[in-house]
């Protein structure tokens, strides 16, 4: 397998976890902090290194089932008591269960809101609930109680006493937490942003196994689906862009390994869209200025998240610049023609072609002729690469057939 596609899982899972933390005002810390707390609990319970690794990865992705739905994201941050909290846990399970690499995380995530006292849709009660799920549940509920405007030491007693009053949690785990709570470093780790960012780097020894290209593609496909689920109008967009970019790269003469990179870039180009509320993505009619500003952040976040993955710098640079235009009118870097790579130009052409063929909230999908007319106009305005659009035109039927419209 290609050396630049032998990627350490930690590097990729951390990036995907950050994508789940995107909001319209930045990147929050819920998953990473939950993972830090889970790790402390797991170590204090003396679980094996192997289980600890699964626990940390599952914690980093535990709310993946809510990432595409802003109402649900908001709701689970504020309550654990409504039975609707089970929905995102089940969705997360469904998203991950068939994954060769991440399937092992599906079960702990499925039961991460199951109550120790019972009354769960799963029918599980007490220690029938998987241990890792019980740990994530408690860690999650510690994290959501933290108020960043107050010193953490002034909050810890209240956080612990709130847990102790609640019959939802494993009493053995609560005992462990009561002891951990006396350790200042435990609390300081949770609020120390440098540690929150870097703690996962200290975990590299957990797994020597590297992800290869096929692993990366299958995980990127999962995240592409999460991104596309943010709006019914983009239900297949990332997948379409992946297929069209790959094929366009192939007919342009790129090697197989390069066309696979375009496939990955297509899958992940809109990862930063997880920062855009559904109501903006689904809005019928013209966006106002504030809404457009929020939309424009998405390639920036796609870039900053992907560039953290070792070996992903080229792909990150393509995804981060897929809205740059050759006349300098694009965003978010305001690049000029000479600064825009061929890969970026190719991805931009594939993205626009797919977007025009697909339906949107404000218009139906276009015919091939109409889409090409729009793209020719963009070439005349010096926005798109003329050579790539010409190749697209020569192969337009073939590329059109790859696009799933509904
Ligand atoms: Fe959750
Ligand atoms: Fe959570
Ligand atoms: Fe985009």
Image (cartoon, rainbow, N blue to C red):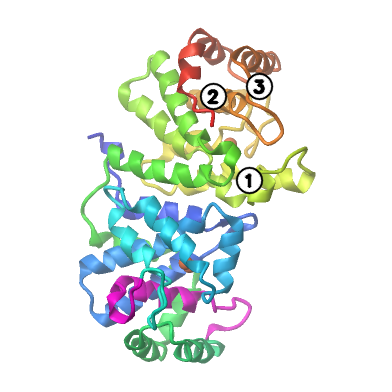
In screen coordinates, is 229 left or right of 372?
left
Residue 89 to residue 41: above or below:
above
**Which is nearer the N-term, disc 2 or disc 3?**
2
Residue named by callout 2: 345
**Which is nearer the N-term, disc 1 or disc 2?**
1
The x, y position of residue 301, in whole percent, is 55, 47
Q: Contact (CB < 8 A) between labels 2 and 3?
A: no
Gap in angstroms between the C-alphas marked 1 and 2:
19 Å
Gap in angstroms between the C-alphas marked 2 and 3:
10 Å
The x, y position of residue 189, in whole percent, is 44, 76
- Neighbor class of circle 3 (other Cα within 10 Å; few <14, some 14-19, many 20+) is many
Q: Is residue 399 visible?
A: yes
Residue named by callout 1: 297
**Secondary-structure class at tag 1:** loop
Q: Quadrant of the C terminus?
A: top right
Residue named by callout 3: 383
User: What segment carries the magenta color?
Assistant: 123-152
For the point 49% across and 56% down, which residue is it?
20
Gap in angstroms between the C-alphas marked 3 and 1:
20 Å
Q: Contact (CB < 8 A) between labels 1 and 2?
A: no
**Secondary-structure class at tag 3:** loop
Residue 209 to residue 140: above or below:
above
**Which is nearer the N-term, disc 3 or disc 1?**
1
Q: Quadrant of the N terminus?
A: top left
In screen coordinates, is 309 left or right of 154?
left
For the point 65% across and 36% down, which residue is it?
331
Residue sitting farthest toward the top: 394
Does residue 245 show up magenta in the picture? no
**Secondary-structure class at tag 2:** helix
Residue 137 to residue 237: above or below:
below
Q: Mark 3 and ligand 3: say if the CB distance to the nearest ligand atom is below 8 Å.
A: no
């Amino acid at each position: 397998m290609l050396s630049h596609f032998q990627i350490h899982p930690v590097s990729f899972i951390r990036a995907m976890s950050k994508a789940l933390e995107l909001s319209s005002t930045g990147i929050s810390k819920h998953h990473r902090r939950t993972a830090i707390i889970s790790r402390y609990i797991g170590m204090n319970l003396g679980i094996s290194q192997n289980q600890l690794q699964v626990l940390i990865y599952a914690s980093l992705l535990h709310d993946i089932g809510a990432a595409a739905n802003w109402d649900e994201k908001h709701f689970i941050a504020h309550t654990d008591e409504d039975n609707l909290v089970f929905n995102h846990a089940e969705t997360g399970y469904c998203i991950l269960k068939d994954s060769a690499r991440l399937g092992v995380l599906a079960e702990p995530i499925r039961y991460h809101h199951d109550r120790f006292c019972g009354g769960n849709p799963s029918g599980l009660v007490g220690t029938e609930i998987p241990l890792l799920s019980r740990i994530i549940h408690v860690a999650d509920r510690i994290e959501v109680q933290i108020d960043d405007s107050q010193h953490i030491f002034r909050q810890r007693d209240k956080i612990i006493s709130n847990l102790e009053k609640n019959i939802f949690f494993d009493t053995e785990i609560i005992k462990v937490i009561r002891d951990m709570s006396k350790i200042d470093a435990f609390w300081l780790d949770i609020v120390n942003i440098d540690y929150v960012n870097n703690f996962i780097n200290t975990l590299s020894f957990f797994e020597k196994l590297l992800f290869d290209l096929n692993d990366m593609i299958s995980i990127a496909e999962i995240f592409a689906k999460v991104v596309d689920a943010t709006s019914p109008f983009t239900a297949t967009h990332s997948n379409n862009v992946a297929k069209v970019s790959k094929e366009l790269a192939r007919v342009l003469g790129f090697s197989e390994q390069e066309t696979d990179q375009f496939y990955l870039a297509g899958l992940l180009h809109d990862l930063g869209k997880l920062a855009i509320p559904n109501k903006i993505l689904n809005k019928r009619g013209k966006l106002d200025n504030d809404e457009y500003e929020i939309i424009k952040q998405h390639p920036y976040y796609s870039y900053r998240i992907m560039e953290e993955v070792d070996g992903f710098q080229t792909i990150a640079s393509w995804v981060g610049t897929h809205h740059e235009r050759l006349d300098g009118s694009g965003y978010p870097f305001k690049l000029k023609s000479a600064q825009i790579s061929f890969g970026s130009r190719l991805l931009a052409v594939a993205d626009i072609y797919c977007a025009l063929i697909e339906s949107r909230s404000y218009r139906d999908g276009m015919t091939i002729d109409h889409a090409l007319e729009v793209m020719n106009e963009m070439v005349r305005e010096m926005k798109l690469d003329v050579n790539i659009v010409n190749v697209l035109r020569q192969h337009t039927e073939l590329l059109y057939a790859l696009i799933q419209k509904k």
